[in-house]
Image (cartoon, rainbow, N blue to C red):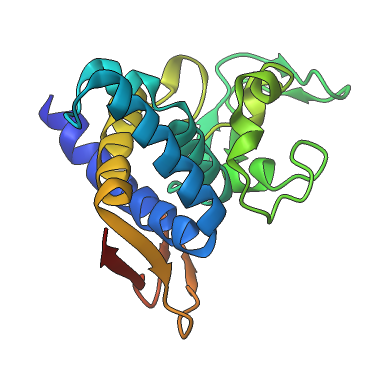
Amino acid sequence: MLTFLLAGFDSSAITLQFALYFLAKNILVQEKALRELQNIFDAAGSTAMTSDTLQRMQYVEMTVYETLRMHPPVFLYIKKAGVDTPLVSSDLVVPAGASVIVSPRTVHMDPKLYPDPHVFDPERFSPANSAERHPLAFIPFGAGKRACPGRKYAILSLKTVISKVIWNFRILPDETYEPELLWGLTMVTANGMRIKLLKR
């Protein structure tokens, strides 16, 4: 458990800050997420976060996924081929022992996979839209046997914090601020992250 907590801390914090930034810049998305929370809490008769209420937060989860699409916290994965591996999309073969570098953000910003990739649109991850997409078109946690084992925990944690913030605050942009991306092993900002929170 300690490994999940420590390994996911930095990447979850990065995702959280970008999610709040995108919610601040996209008020209609924020309002739709708030309406979802109102409906869920009204039906439950309580604003308590339970496994049931968190499970029902579909739009909030879609917002997390869209954040991870636009700004996956891990910029590059380096993998080594264990066996000769033919690539499905071409006649190339990756020889055993060769290192392969995969950039999730490059995949996620491909307009063939995601039209208007620079537009923040959680609807890309609706059940209908997700069903039509190749499973390897969204890889913020890697894929296959070596995928991040803390994926479900990370999504649950992010949904909990984001829904609490949306429920208690209006998230507004700081119009004087624009994030300066710093590319490294993780994708962070060189100038922090600034938003405004107004108590509801």
Query: Which residue is located at x 11 percent, y 30 percent?
Result: 2
Which residue is nearer to you in this view: 40 or 96?
A: 40
Taking the image as shown, residue 122 lies to the left or right of residue 141, namely: right
Q: Can residue 200 be seen at all in this image of the molecule?
A: yes
Query: Which residue is located at x 68 percent, y 56 percent?
Result: 118
Would you place residue 165 above or below residue 175 in this image? above
Taking the image as shown, residue 46 lies to the left or right of residue 119, namely: left
Give the position of the N terminus as an image quadrant.
top left
Which residue is nearer to you in this view: 137 or 39?
A: 39
Query: Which residue is located at x 66 percent, y 47 percent?
Result: 106
Which residue is nearer to you in this view: 108 or 38?
A: 38
Image coordinates for residue 26, horizontal then vertical, percent: 54, 58
Query: Which residue is located at x 52 percent, y 23 percent?
Result: 143
Would you place residue 64 above or below residue 93 in this image? below
**Farthest left residue in view:** 2
Image coordinates for residue 67, horizontal then vertical, percent: 50, 46
In terms of image quadrants, where is residue 187? Answer: bottom left
Would you place residue 193 above or below residue 55 in this image? below
Image coordinates for residue 80, horizontal then vertical, percent: 53, 28
